[in-house]
Amino acid sequence: MQGYGIVLIGLLALLIGLTAGKAWERYKLVEGRWVDRRRVRQSPHFILGLNHLVAGQVDLAIDELERAAKLDPGALELRLVLGNLHREKGQVGRAIQEHQALLQRPRLNKIEHANVLLCLGLDYRRGGFVDRAVAAFQDVLKLDPDNEAALVNLEKLQEDQHQWQEAYVTRRRLARIAGPPDQPNSQLILAFLENELGLQALKEGRLDDAIARFEAAIELDSRVIPAYLHLGDAQHQRGDLAAATATWERAIAVAPDRAYLSLARLEETYDTLGQPDRFAERCRALTAASPREWRARVALARHLTHGGEPSLALALLFDALEHNPHAIAIHQAIWATLSLLDLPKQLVARYIDITRQSVFYLDPHVCLRCRYRSTELIWQCPHCHEWNTFVEERITPATDTEAEIPAALVQ
Ligand SMILES: [Zn+2]
């Protein structure tokens, strides 16, 4: 019987120990009173706050989360989030205050310290305090060298200030951390940064350096079209016209949809080389490969007009217009050429005829709720089933769009 009692006492002691341990985990002594750590997350204010956040109601979310935070003044994450919400609302001063206060807390561990500094850096960046933002992100990296958020923000700040070399070093760090799956994206960014470094060298007259940079950019990622354009420019400056045209032709081969960027350069250089026919050939090859490639047609039309063949040019422009009735540049080129020909009635009539056929392209009806498009006015949207949501989409300045929304939809 006595042995049984000892076992019972032992079990009881164990139970008390466990309960005390649990309680210790759950409660924390804050400024002389015991605080239940779980109460914050279980409080209705916390849940309501999250609901408001999901609904995008930032003010209401702040109110509720402030109440939840009162249950445990020590909750670091909640105060961090509250500071971030103030920043998102545009109250940068308030956010900075909130986050700076957290830095004063004793016994922040390394990761907590880095998190607070990161939020503070984001506040400074939002407020336009560039130097302080840079310093904050650099402090984060001293505590946590692989902090991707700090590196990405630092890179953006360096790019904003055209510190291309510094941005390059930062991107290299990010590429190393991200490892192989994200490396192609980093390669592309590094290539664009190389291109910027090349442009800087070009501006300062360091031609060889510039050429090396542009070539390195293409080596990193062959899709970086500006590197080809500027490499050609540098080769042109050096007097190597054959190399320049070869480079621009490569750019067209890599990205035919961006060919128009090379075409103006090629036109002039072919002329200088005494081979103007090469330009017409190139434009014709481009339009044959892609009928919607109206820019090559317009470029060739301009070339033909300059060469004294406006009638041929006009035929090309009419072709281009049929494929892309929206392109204002085509309409302008047509009117310029028609004027040059003294507005022959027959050709003006042809222009009116082509544009009349494509009028429906110019005034598509679009649902304001779901962006469903229709060529005619519909009263109920077949996609989102809302009533009276269609407006005619017109190319107008952004400020006009509100006036176009029917009064019924403005709540
Ligand atoms: Zn709709």
Image: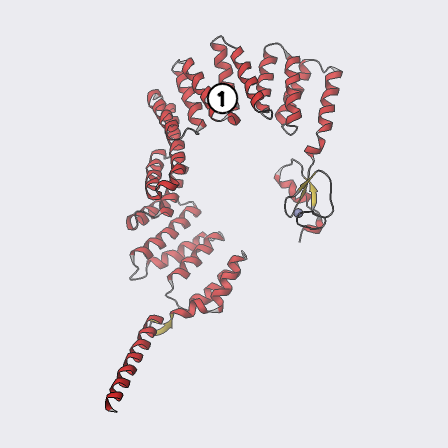
Task: Name the residue: 57% across, 19% down.
Answer: 299
Residue 366 visible to an observer of this rendering: yes
Residue 216 vs 372, above or below: the answer is above
Residue 308 pos. (x, y %)? 62, 9
Residue 135 pos. (x, y %)? 33, 46
Q: Is residue 313 left or right of residue 7?
A: right
Residue placed most toward the observer, 49 or 401: 49
Task: Name the residue: 51% across, 25% down.
Answer: 256
Residue 204 visible to an observer of this rendering: no
Residue 277 vs 289, above or below: the answer is above
Residue 191 occupies which quadrant of the picture? top left
Of helix, strand and loop, which one carries label 1? helix
User: In the displayed image of the protein, which residue is found farthest to the bottom?
Assistant: 1
Residue placed most toward the observer, 120 or 44: 44
Q: Is mark 1 within 8 Å of ligand 1?
A: no
Residue 20 vs 213, above or below: the answer is below
Residue 84 occupies which quadrant of the picture? bottom left
Q: What kind of residue is marked 1?
A: Ser
Q: Is residue 298 left or right of residue 232?
A: right
Residue 137 vs 210, above or below: the answer is below
The quarter of the rendered structure image containing the C terminus is: bottom right
Residue placed most toward the observer, 407 or 322: 322
Residue 376 occupies which quadrant of the picture? top right
The quarter of the rendered structure image containing the N terminus is: bottom left
Q: Residues within 10 Å of mark 1 (few under 14, many from 20)?
A: many
Task: Name the residue: 35% across, 27% down.
Answer: 216
Residue tagged by mark 1? 262
Residue 290 pos. (x, y %)? 57, 24
User: In the displayed image of the protein, which residue is found farthest to the top?
Assistant: 274
Residue 146 pos. (x, y %)? 32, 47
- How has the structure been colored for display? secondary structure
